[in-house]
Amino acid sequence: MKNIVELKTYELERGIIISVMTSNLERKSAEDSLSELQFLAKTAHVEIVKTFLQTLPSKHPATYIGKGKVEEIKLYCAENNIALILFDDDLSPAQIRNLVKELERKIVDRSGLILDIFASRAKSKEAITQVKLAQMQYLLPRLTRMWTHLSKQYGGVGTKGPGETQIETDRRLIKTKISQLKDELTHIEVERFEQRKKRKEMFRVALVGYTNAGKSTLMNTLSNADVFVENLLFATLDTTVRQIQLTQSLNILLSDTVGFIRKLPSHLIASFKSTLAEVFEADLLLHVVDITHPNFTEHIAVVNSTLEELKANEIPMILVFNKIDAIQERETLRELAHQFPEAICISAQRGINIETLKETIAEKLQHDWKEETLVIPQSNNRLLAQLHEVAEIVSKEYEGNDIIVKIRIQKKVSEAVEKLLKRKAKVEI
Ligand SMILES: Nc1nc2c(ncn2[C@@H]2O[C@H](COP(=O)(O)OP(=O)(O)OP(=O)(O)O)[C@@H](O)[C@H]2O)c(=O)[nH]1
Ligand SMILES: [Mg+2]
């Protein structure tokens, strides 16, 4: 059982990638997605020997690729000593099962590979627990193939694979493990919540962006921290929080956390809730973009839709275009500035334009947020609860029959708060 969860090493395995597009119109996006999968494979230390891009009228329900292609791939794998076949899409559990049977190789789909990379990168107890939960949830409906895969790996060639009974036992064990992991995560979430509550005095700014955009590098530049930076995907899986002095009178807390990618498995987003809380509870987001990447506009769209999924799309945001040092043509930079006038162009690595960025952060915080101190009668519990919903409660002190509440509100919702307060005549501001 232990092995099922910890079998994720592809180290030096020879693999191929298969991708299918259903019309020629999809070619560009299929090719982009394919080159990203190659980068993911490199991150997982798989040696990619060849990629197959096939056009099909529709994806085959049983085997994803057509029958003829299955035969061709089988032959190719045998002749070229291929151990692993990566699919640039998510396969159904039945497709995986059928493909394992036909091809007799390890079959890994896009979500499976991302999960495995997360698993190998997770270091803190929180990240490990979160990844394990996502892996278990992914594994549960696919147990048959995993077991077949395991029996090949550990049972030795030629021995008969274990029967359905074993699979049932494993399925039960996995379900138990899932509920244990959920309990552990609830504990971690409570701890995190308590920690965050203590930090409410300061504005909280979160770095968000596509993986490899340069978030951790910017964190290091802004805070002199020493966050792990690497030119591979998902270098960061935990959250680092640092205090930064923006101006003489303004300190903020800056957090750096996990990057996004297209088709990020939804299990992962769900189980990374406690890590991502830094994002959806932030007062301001710095959306870091690697503008040297040919698909950076698509990356922006992926990040925006992931933020929507996290319900963080209403938070004020600054678009930060990173890696300008690597752009040679001044004309390209001018075009970018014209197309995205709101973006701040920087180089996190070379420290270019960092002061402008700091000033913009300070201005935006002061422009979008305001703080107020209210005196509420202790008897008015309902108002306090309503305030919790529309504003951030920075601090609460009890004085006689009153509660002195310091709140922070986005200016765009402050009217709603004023209305709420006006209805309660006894409140002093
Ligand atoms: N040329 C150039 N490279 C940069 C710059 N900022 C970051 N990089 C490089 O981009 C790569 C990714 O940087 P990270 O800071 O690890 O990126 P990240 O967004 O934290 O990535 P994940 O943690 O994987 O999501 C590293 O190789 C950095 O050295 C920059 O301003 N210019
Ligand atoms: Mg990082």
Image (cartoon, helix red, strand yellow):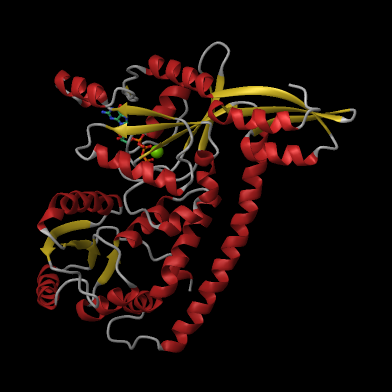
- Ligand 2's quadrant: top left
Looking at the image, which residue sits at the far top?
A: 248
Visible residue check, residue 158: yes
Could you tell whether 149 is left or right of 105 in the image?
A: right
In front: 407, or 266? 407
**Which residue is painted at 76% across and 32% down in the image?**
424
In the image, residue 215 lies at what x, y percent?
A: 39, 33
**Which residue is painted at 13% across and 68% down in the image?**
57
In the image, residue 26 lies at what x, y percent?
A: 15, 54
The image quadrant that residue 76 belongs to is bottom left
Quadrant the C terminus occupies: top right
Could you tell whether 242 is left or right of 117 in the image?
A: right
271 w.r.t. 340: above or below? below
Could you tell whether 263 is left or right of 421 in the image?
A: left
In front: 299, or 87? 299
In the image, residue 63 lies at what x, y percent?
A: 22, 75
In front: 244, or 265? 265
In the image, residue 279 lies at what x, y percent?
A: 50, 39
The image quadrant that residue 94 belongs to is bottom left
